[in-house]
Amino acid sequence: MDLFEQVDRSIFEFGTRLHLVRAEHWMLATPCEEWDVRALVNHVVGGATRYTMLLHGATAGDVVATVALDHLGEDPMGSFDRRAEEVVHAFGEPGALSRTVHHPAGDISGHELLELRITEFAVHAWDLSRAIGADEQIDPALVDPMWRHMSVAGTRVDPGESPLARLLHLTGRRP
């Protein structure tokens, strides 16, 4: 599966969970200790906005300045759909994957940025599922490429755990 299929699937994973969010869910705690459901969704939508900005030449400072903004407004699902479409379009622009972008963590390629975006959508789909009590399974076709992208030599995992559990442990989560 190529990266564009992966990003589409990761968007589907997050969007499916987002459709399950009800009014009473927005203030629930998430596995990301500093965020409730609304803050988590705002982070994901804002991340799509920031990655689009990076692909269009924004500086790290430009994107950091958007972190505290409300990216959801009155229509969180509509905001998610629009920003997800925009970021996929930006990644599909000629030369986008070979560009150097100035991510706050350091300069990386557009290709690496896309891998990060896939991971963000998919792992935060798990976070959202955990918060609202939805199915926590992530498409297995996404888990292996994310694991390969994120794992580093010396990472210790329990070989008896599922691939998703190993990935979640690597991202600091405890399934």
Image (cartoon, grey):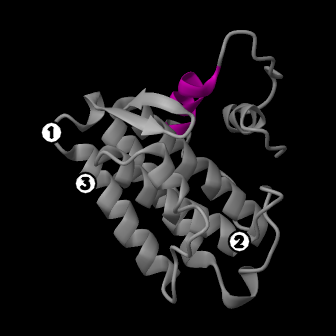
Residue at 82% x, 46% y: name it: 175
Residue occupied by mark 1: 94
Decide which of tag 3 and tag 1 comes sooner along the chain: 3
Tag in front: 2 or 1: 1
- For the residue marked with disc 3, what is the amino acid? His
Q: CA distance from mark 2 to mark 3?
A: 26 Å
10 Å neighbourhood of mark 1: few (<14), some, or many (≥20)? few
Residue at 80% x, 22% y: name it: 157
Residue occupied by mark 2: 37
Indicate the position of residue 40 as horizontal and vertical percent values.
Answer: 66, 64
Q: CA distance from mark 2 to mark 1?
A: 35 Å
10 Å neighbourhood of mark 2: few (<14), some, or many (≥20)? many
- For the residue marked with disc 1, what is the amino acid? Pro
**Circle 3 SS class:** helix
Q: Is residue 97 magenta?
A: no
10 Å neighbourhood of mark 3: few (<14), some, or many (≥20)? few
Decide which of tag 2 and tag 1 comes sooner along the chain: 2
Against 8, is 115 above or below?
above
Residue occupied by mark 3: 89
Indicate the position of residue 155 as horizontal and vertical percent values.
Answer: 75, 17
Q: Which span is picked out in magenta?
A: 142-151
Nearer-the-camera pick, 31 or 71: 71
Decide which of tag 2 and tag 3 comes sooner along the chain: 2
Indicate the position of residue 56 as horizontal and vertical percent values.
Answer: 28, 48
- Tell me the quarter of the image containing the N terminus: top left
- For the residue marked with disc 2, what is the amino acid? Val
Nearer-the-camera pick, 162 or 100: 100
Against 152, is 54 above or below?
below
Q: CA distance from mark 3 to mark 1?
A: 10 Å
Q: Is residue 147 magenta?
A: yes
User: Which residue is situated farthest in the front direction here?
Assistant: 61
